[in-house]
Amino acid sequence: MRRIAPHSPSDRRWKDHRSAMLISMRSSYQRMTADHPNGADRKLPIANLKSPPMDVLITAGPTREPIDPVRYIGNRSSGRMGAALVSGALAAGHRVTVILGPVAFAFPAGVRRIDVETAAQMHDAVLREFPSHDLLIMAAAVADYRPIHVHSDKLGREGALTIECEATPDIVATAAKIKRPGQRIIGFSLESEGNLARARQKLARKNLDLIVYNPVGTMNSEEVEATLIWPDGREEPLPRQSKMQFAQTLLNERGAAP
Protein backbone atom coordinates (compact mmCIF):
# COMPACT_ATOMS: atom_id res chain seq x y z
CA MET A 1 0.00 0.00 0.00
CA ARG A 2 1.45 3.39 -0.98
CA ARG A 3 2.76 5.66 1.72
CA ILE A 4 3.69 9.34 1.47
CA ALA A 5 7.22 10.03 2.68
CA PRO A 6 6.28 12.78 5.19
CA HIS A 7 3.98 10.24 6.90
CA SER A 8 6.58 7.48 7.42
CA PRO A 9 7.94 7.85 11.00
CA SER A 10 9.72 5.11 12.85
CA ASP A 11 7.52 2.61 14.66
CA ARG A 12 8.36 4.05 18.08
CA ARG A 13 7.75 7.64 17.05
CA TRP A 14 4.49 6.66 15.37
CA LYS A 15 3.26 4.84 18.49
CA ASP A 16 4.04 7.88 20.64
CA HIS A 17 2.30 10.17 18.16
CA ARG A 18 -0.68 7.81 17.91
CA SER A 19 -1.12 7.67 21.71
CA ALA A 20 -1.06 11.47 21.94
CA MET A 21 -3.52 11.74 19.07
CA LEU A 22 -5.97 9.33 20.72
CA ILE A 23 -5.87 11.33 23.95
CA SER A 24 -6.55 14.52 22.00
CA MET A 25 -9.32 12.81 20.03
CA ARG A 26 -11.09 11.70 23.21
CA SER A 27 -11.54 15.34 24.25
CA SER A 28 -12.68 16.39 20.75
CA TYR A 29 -15.05 13.44 20.45
CA GLN A 30 -16.66 14.08 23.84
CA ARG A 31 -17.20 17.75 23.00
CA MET A 32 -18.84 16.82 19.70
CA THR A 33 -21.24 14.30 21.29
CA ALA A 34 -21.91 16.06 24.59
CA ASP A 35 -25.57 16.68 23.72
CA HIS A 36 -26.26 13.20 22.38
CA PRO A 37 -29.27 11.62 24.18
CA ASN A 38 -27.60 8.23 24.51
CA GLY A 39 -24.81 8.37 27.10
CA ALA A 40 -23.25 5.18 25.75
CA ASP A 41 -22.53 6.94 22.48
CA ARG A 42 -20.13 9.29 24.24
CA LYS A 43 -17.54 6.51 24.50
CA LEU A 44 -14.57 6.86 22.20
CA PRO A 45 -14.69 4.16 19.49
CA ILE A 46 -12.19 1.39 20.15
CA ALA A 47 -9.13 1.92 17.97
CA ASN A 48 -8.09 -1.04 15.84
CA LEU A 49 -4.45 -0.90 16.87
CA LYS A 50 -3.53 -3.98 14.82
CA SER A 51 -4.54 -2.27 11.57
CA PRO A 52 -1.73 -0.39 9.82
CA PRO A 53 -2.32 3.35 9.56
CA MET A 54 -3.76 4.54 6.27
CA ASP A 55 -4.14 7.87 4.54
CA VAL A 56 -7.92 8.29 4.49
CA LEU A 57 -9.80 10.85 2.37
CA ILE A 58 -13.37 11.58 3.49
CA THR A 59 -15.92 13.85 1.82
CA ALA A 60 -18.72 15.21 3.97
CA GLY A 61 -21.62 17.63 4.10
CA PRO A 62 -23.76 19.04 1.28
CA THR A 63 -22.87 21.12 -1.75
CA ARG A 64 -24.57 24.36 -2.75
CA GLU A 65 -25.16 25.15 -6.40
CA PRO A 66 -25.79 28.90 -6.79
CA ILE A 67 -28.83 30.34 -8.52
CA ASP A 68 -27.91 33.96 -7.78
CA PRO A 69 -25.76 35.66 -5.10
CA VAL A 70 -28.33 34.73 -2.42
CA ARG A 71 -30.11 31.52 -3.44
CA TYR A 72 -28.82 28.04 -4.18
CA ILE A 73 -29.85 24.43 -4.81
CA GLY A 74 -28.82 22.22 -1.90
CA ASN A 75 -30.06 19.53 0.48
CA ARG A 76 -30.61 18.84 4.17
CA SER A 77 -27.29 17.11 4.88
CA SER A 78 -25.86 18.16 8.25
CA GLY A 79 -22.43 16.54 7.86
CA ARG A 80 -22.95 14.35 10.95
CA MET A 81 -22.05 11.15 9.10
CA GLY A 82 -18.84 12.67 7.83
CA ALA A 83 -17.95 13.96 11.30
CA ALA A 84 -18.50 10.47 12.74
CA LEU A 85 -16.30 8.91 10.06
CA VAL A 86 -13.54 11.45 10.65
CA SER A 87 -13.64 10.76 14.42
CA GLY A 88 -13.62 7.01 13.85
CA ALA A 89 -10.71 7.17 11.41
CA LEU A 90 -8.65 9.34 13.75
CA ALA A 91 -9.41 7.09 16.72
CA ALA A 92 -8.26 4.08 14.68
CA GLY A 93 -4.93 5.83 14.10
CA HIS A 94 -5.37 6.80 10.46
CA ARG A 95 -4.22 10.07 8.88
CA VAL A 96 -7.28 11.94 7.66
CA THR A 97 -8.05 14.57 5.06
CA VAL A 98 -11.66 15.80 4.94
CA ILE A 99 -13.17 17.65 1.98
CA LEU A 100 -16.08 19.46 3.57
CA GLY A 101 -19.11 21.18 2.14
CA PRO A 102 -20.84 24.04 4.02
CA VAL A 103 -21.98 22.72 7.43
CA ALA A 104 -22.88 24.26 10.77
CA PHE A 105 -22.04 21.03 12.62
CA ALA A 106 -18.78 21.02 14.61
CA PHE A 107 -16.02 18.88 13.10
CA PRO A 108 -13.18 17.18 15.00
CA ALA A 109 -9.80 18.85 15.22
CA GLY A 110 -6.64 17.10 14.12
CA VAL A 111 -7.47 16.63 10.45
CA ARG A 112 -6.36 18.29 7.25
CA ARG A 113 -9.51 20.14 6.16
CA ILE A 114 -10.39 21.43 2.69
CA ASP A 115 -13.54 23.54 2.55
CA VAL A 116 -15.60 23.64 -0.65
CA GLU A 117 -19.05 24.87 -1.61
CA THR A 118 -20.03 23.49 -5.02
CA ALA A 119 -19.97 20.03 -6.59
CA ALA A 120 -17.38 21.25 -9.10
CA GLN A 121 -15.08 22.38 -6.30
CA MET A 122 -15.48 19.04 -4.49
CA HIS A 123 -14.86 17.18 -7.75
CA ASP A 124 -11.58 19.04 -8.31
CA ALA A 125 -10.47 18.56 -4.69
CA VAL A 126 -11.17 14.80 -4.72
CA LEU A 127 -9.29 14.23 -7.98
CA ARG A 128 -6.37 16.27 -6.67
CA GLU A 129 -6.20 14.50 -3.28
CA PHE A 130 -7.19 10.90 -4.00
CA PRO A 131 -3.90 9.81 -5.64
CA SER A 132 -2.03 10.38 -2.34
CA HIS A 133 -4.55 8.46 -0.19
CA ASP A 134 -5.24 4.77 0.41
CA LEU A 135 -8.97 4.99 1.04
CA LEU A 136 -11.71 7.33 -0.20
CA ILE A 137 -15.00 7.42 1.73
CA MET A 138 -17.47 9.42 -0.32
CA ALA A 139 -19.99 10.41 2.38
CA ALA A 140 -20.85 13.88 1.05
CA ALA A 141 -24.39 14.57 -0.14
CA VAL A 142 -23.46 16.13 -3.46
CA ALA A 143 -26.23 18.00 -5.29
CA ASP A 144 -27.29 16.06 -8.38
CA TYR A 145 -28.15 19.16 -10.41
CA ARG A 146 -26.94 22.74 -10.79
CA PRO A 147 -28.40 25.73 -12.65
CA ILE A 148 -27.06 26.12 -16.18
CA HIS A 149 -27.09 29.88 -15.79
CA VAL A 150 -26.09 31.62 -12.56
CA HIS A 151 -27.49 35.15 -12.21
CA SER A 152 -24.94 37.77 -11.18
CA ASP A 153 -27.61 39.92 -9.49
CA LYS A 154 -30.23 38.88 -6.96
CA LEU A 155 -33.42 37.88 -8.74
CA GLY A 156 -36.52 39.85 -7.90
CA ARG A 157 -39.80 38.24 -6.90
CA GLU A 158 -41.78 38.56 -10.12
CA GLY A 159 -44.18 35.64 -10.44
CA ALA A 160 -43.16 32.15 -11.54
CA LEU A 161 -39.51 31.21 -11.95
CA THR A 162 -38.14 28.41 -14.13
CA ILE A 163 -34.57 27.24 -13.53
CA GLU A 164 -32.95 25.06 -16.18
CA CYS A 165 -30.45 22.64 -14.63
CA GLU A 166 -27.75 20.23 -15.71
CA ALA A 167 -26.26 17.23 -13.94
CA THR A 168 -23.27 17.79 -11.68
CA PRO A 169 -20.14 15.65 -12.21
CA ASP A 170 -20.25 12.12 -10.77
CA ILE A 171 -17.34 12.53 -8.38
CA VAL A 172 -16.98 8.99 -7.05
CA ALA A 173 -17.29 7.40 -10.49
CA THR A 174 -14.59 9.71 -11.83
CA ALA A 175 -12.32 8.91 -8.88
CA ALA A 176 -12.81 5.18 -9.53
CA LYS A 177 -11.40 5.63 -13.02
CA ILE A 178 -8.06 6.76 -11.61
CA LYS A 179 -7.96 4.23 -8.75
CA ARG A 180 -4.70 2.32 -8.66
CA PRO A 181 -4.10 -1.18 -7.22
CA GLY A 182 -4.21 -1.05 -3.43
CA GLN A 183 -6.59 1.89 -3.23
CA ARG A 184 -10.19 1.44 -2.08
CA ILE A 185 -13.37 3.48 -2.53
CA ILE A 186 -16.46 3.33 -0.32
CA GLY A 187 -19.56 5.08 -1.62
CA PHE A 188 -22.92 5.95 -0.07
CA SER A 189 -26.34 5.52 -1.66
CA LEU A 190 -29.12 7.57 -0.08
CA GLU A 191 -32.35 6.04 -1.35
CA SER A 192 -36.04 5.71 -0.60
CA GLU A 193 -36.86 3.06 1.99
CA GLY A 194 -36.08 -0.45 0.73
CA ASN A 195 -34.62 0.55 -2.65
CA LEU A 196 -31.48 -1.59 -2.40
CA ALA A 197 -31.60 -2.39 -6.12
CA ARG A 198 -30.57 1.16 -6.96
CA ALA A 199 -27.65 0.94 -4.54
CA ARG A 200 -26.51 -2.34 -6.16
CA GLN A 201 -26.62 -0.70 -9.59
CA LYS A 202 -24.51 2.22 -8.37
CA LEU A 203 -21.95 -0.15 -6.84
CA ALA A 204 -21.41 -1.90 -10.17
CA ARG A 205 -21.69 1.14 -12.44
CA LYS A 206 -19.28 3.26 -10.42
CA ASN A 207 -16.75 0.45 -9.81
CA LEU A 208 -16.73 0.77 -6.01
CA ASP A 209 -15.26 -1.60 -3.43
CA LEU A 210 -18.23 -1.20 -1.08
CA ILE A 211 -21.42 0.83 -1.03
CA VAL A 212 -23.47 1.84 1.99
CA TYR A 213 -27.22 1.88 1.42
CA ASN A 214 -29.01 4.20 3.82
CA PRO A 215 -32.64 5.37 3.61
CA VAL A 216 -33.46 9.06 3.19
CA GLY A 217 -34.72 9.26 6.78
CA THR A 218 -31.13 9.13 8.01
CA MET A 219 -30.29 12.52 6.51
CA ASN A 220 -29.79 15.11 9.26
CA SER A 221 -30.45 12.36 11.84
CA GLU A 222 -28.34 11.15 14.77
CA GLU A 223 -28.85 7.51 13.73
CA VAL A 224 -28.55 5.32 10.65
CA GLU A 225 -29.93 1.92 9.63
CA ALA A 226 -27.53 0.97 6.86
CA THR A 227 -26.89 -2.04 4.65
CA LEU A 228 -23.36 -2.78 3.43
CA ILE A 229 -23.14 -4.17 -0.12
CA TRP A 230 -20.01 -5.68 -1.71
CA PRO A 231 -19.26 -6.40 -5.40
CA ASP A 232 -19.18 -10.16 -4.75
CA GLY A 233 -22.86 -10.14 -3.80
CA ARG A 234 -22.49 -10.11 -0.02
CA GLU A 235 -24.92 -7.88 1.85
CA GLU A 236 -25.00 -7.09 5.54
CA PRO A 237 -27.97 -5.23 7.05
CA LEU A 238 -26.85 -3.43 10.19
CA PRO A 239 -29.07 -2.62 13.18
CA ARG A 240 -30.21 0.93 13.73
CA GLN A 241 -27.40 2.66 15.59
CA SER A 242 -25.79 6.02 16.14
CA LYS A 243 -23.63 7.33 13.33
CA MET A 244 -20.63 7.14 15.67
CA GLN A 245 -21.24 3.42 16.21
CA PHE A 246 -21.72 2.89 12.48
CA ALA A 247 -18.44 4.67 11.71
CA GLN A 248 -16.61 2.35 14.08
CA THR A 249 -18.17 -0.70 12.41
CA LEU A 250 -17.27 0.51 8.94
CA LEU A 251 -13.71 1.55 9.72
CA ASN A 252 -12.60 -1.13 12.17
CA GLU A 253 -14.55 -4.24 11.25
CA ARG A 254 -15.89 -4.17 7.69
CA GLY A 255 -15.17 -2.37 4.48
CA ALA A 256 -12.16 -0.25 5.36
CA ALA A 257 -9.79 -3.09 6.18
CA PRO A 258 -6.90 -3.22 3.68
Image (cartoon, rainbow, N blue to C red):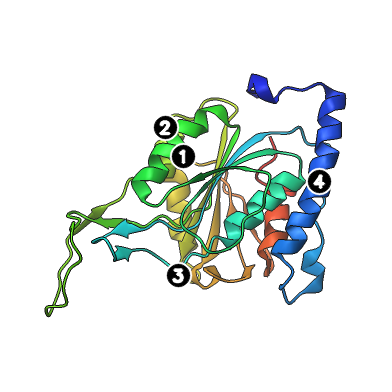
Frontmost residue, 75 versus 136: 75
**Lower position in the chain sequence, tag 3 or tag 4:** 4
Dot 4 alpha-carbon crowd within 10 angstroms: few under 14, some 14 to 19, many 20 or more: some
Cα–Cα gap, marks 1 and 3: 22 Å
Q: Which residue is labeled 1 in the image? A: 207
**Lower position in the chain sequence, tag 4 or tag 2:** 4
Q: Position of residue 69 (x, y in %)?
A: 26, 60
Does residue 4 lie above or below 87 as drawn? above
Q: Which residue is labeled 2 in the image? A: 177
Do residues under tags 2 and 1 come within 8 Å of each other at their CB atoms?
Answer: yes
- For the residue marked with disc 4, what is the amino acid? Leu
Circle on res. 158: none
| Residue in the image at 49% along x and 69% along y | 216
Q: Which residue is labeled 3 in the image? A: 192
Q: Position of residue 148 (x, y in %)?
A: 19, 54
- For the residue marked with disc 2, what is the amino acid? Lys
- For the residue marked with disc 1, what is the amino acid? Asn
Q: Does dot 3 land on a helix, a strand or a loop?
A: loop
